[in-house]
Image: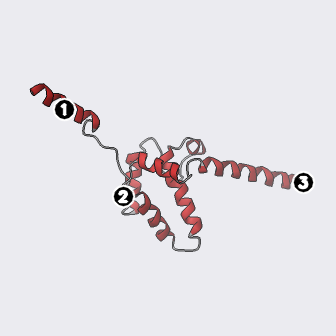
């Protein structure tokens, strides 16, 4: 009987990840959102300049999901109060873990939007250079 109890306790610990839980996104305010992002993605530099171009190519899917949804909402609410739009984004992801954010991104076709946007900007830059060269 004692062995069954010990084995059951061990299985519960293994299933629950030894008591540790993944950090969740706290979207109650801009400050809590930033703080929770830093906890969820400790390897990402969240300075005022934003991630480098190289970092943007290797974003965790959950962070890319958040960024792409933010862009989508900001464009759909163009001309409206920026804080309301950012609050709308925070509400969507509030309480989610990185895995849940990634699943949301997959369900809503948000994974890959950053690389697509970067490619589009690169093509635009090349096109503008060609135009500039034509008029010189």
Where disc 2 sits, the SS reads helix
Can I make out residue 91 in this image? yes
CA gap, disc 3 and disc 2? 50 Å
Dot placed on the residue nearer the N-terminal end, 1 or 3: 1
Q: Are marks 2 and 1 in contact (CB under 8 Å)?
A: no
Instruction: Give residue 134's mark.
Output: 3
In-front residue for pair 31/9 = 9
Q: Is residue 49 above or below residue 58?
A: below
**Hey, which residue is sitting farthest left in the picture?**
1
Q: Which residue is mark 1?
A: 8
Ranked by sequence position, the earlier of labels 2 and 1 is 1
Q: How many marks?
A: 3
- Circle 2 residues within 10 Å: few <14, some 14–19, many ≥20: some
Where is mark 2, residue-wise?
A: 32
* Residue occupying image coordinates x 47% and y 65%: 86
Quarter of the image where the C terminus is located: bottom right
Query: Which quadrant: the N terminus?
Result: top left
Q: Nearer the viewer, residue 33 or 65?
A: 65
Residue at image location 70% in from the left, 51% down from the top: 120
- Left or right: 12 in relation to 118: left
The earlier-in-sequence mark between 3 and 2 is: 2
Q: Position of residue 104 (x, y in %)?
A: 47, 52
């Amino acid at each position: 009987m004692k062995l069954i109890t010990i084995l059951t306790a061990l299985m519960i610990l293994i299933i629950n990840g030894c008591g540790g839980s993944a950090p969740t996104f706290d979207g109650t305010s801009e400050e809590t959102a930033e703080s929770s992002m830093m906890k969820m993605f400790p390897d990402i530099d969240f300075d005022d300049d934003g991630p480098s171009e190289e970092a943007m190519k290797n974003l965790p899917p959950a962070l890319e999901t958040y960024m792409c949804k933010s862009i989508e909402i900001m464009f759909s609410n163009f001309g409206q109060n920026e804080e309301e739009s950012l609050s709308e984004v925070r509400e969507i992801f509030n309480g989610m873990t990185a895995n849940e954010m990634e699943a949301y991104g997959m369900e809503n076709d948000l994974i890959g939007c950053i690389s697509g946007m970067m490619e589009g900007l690169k093509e635009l830059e090349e096109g503008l250079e060609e135009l500039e060269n034509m008029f010189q």
